Image (tube, helix red, strand yellow):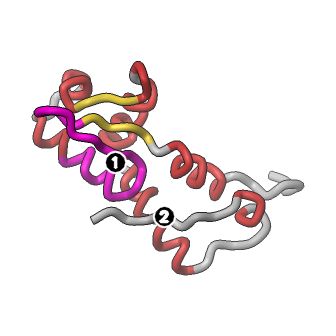
Amino acid sequence: MSIQLPVLCSSVRTREPLTAGEAGELAVAFKALGDPVRLRLLSLIAAHDGGEACVCDLAGAFELSQPTISHHLKVLREAGLVTSERRATWVYYQVVPHRIALLADVLAPAAGATT
């Protein structure tokens, strides 16, 4: 089951606080990224040639089994941060750019805000 992140307009998000529902939905994605393995997987996928990678491309970067890597990728997929496509025996993953942009937007200060 895939979690659907809210569709928020960046100009609105920097001017008004999140609703409880939006915060709950976004927390799923932030929680998925709270694990160093998943954060690194997301980075490796985004940096991979063509912007997609399969488990066979990623497993060598970790001292983890392929099933463990697949579990972490499933968490990222369920959080809406990556998509997957099966090709023969391999599953290829791609980062969902608008989801990443949404997370970044929530963390960005409002226009004119001082630090």
Q: Secondary structure at mark 1?
A: loop
Q: Residue furthest bottom?
A: 20
Up/down of 37 relative to 1, above or below:
above
Nearest to the observer: residue 44 or residue 114 = 44
Q: Considering depth in this image, is 66 or 36 the residue closer to the camera?
A: 66
Can residue 86 be found in the magenta stretch? Answer: yes
Magenta-span inclusion, residue 85: yes
Measuring from the top left, give residue 10's x and y in whole percent: 71, 57
Q: Which residue is mark 2?
A: 5
Of the two numbered discs 2 and 1 in the rendering, the one whose residue sits closer to the viewer: 2
Is 48 displayed left or right of 102 in the figure?
A: left
Residue 59, quarter of picture: top left
The residue sitting at 66% across, 53% down in the picture is 105
Crowding around mark 1 (Cα neighbors within 10 Å: few <14, some 14 to 19, many 20+) is: few
- Region rendered in magenta: 71-91
> What is the x, y in percent for residue 66?
12, 35
Q: Quadrant of the N terminus?
A: bottom left
Q: Does 97 sit left or right of 114 as displayed?
A: left
The percent position of residue 19, horizontal first and vertical second, equals 61, 78
Residue 93, by quadrant, is: top left
Q: What residue type is disc 2 on?
A: Leu
Q: Nearer the viewer, residue 97 or 86?
A: 86
> Most extreme residue toward the top, as rendered?
49
| Circle 2 SS class | loop
Residue at image position (84%, 56%) is 113
Mark 1 = which residue? Answer: 35
Which amino acid lies under the numbered mark 1 shown in the image of this protein? Asp
For image coordinates 56% across by 48% down, the residue present is: 98
Q: Earlier in the sequence, mark 2 or mark 1?
A: 2
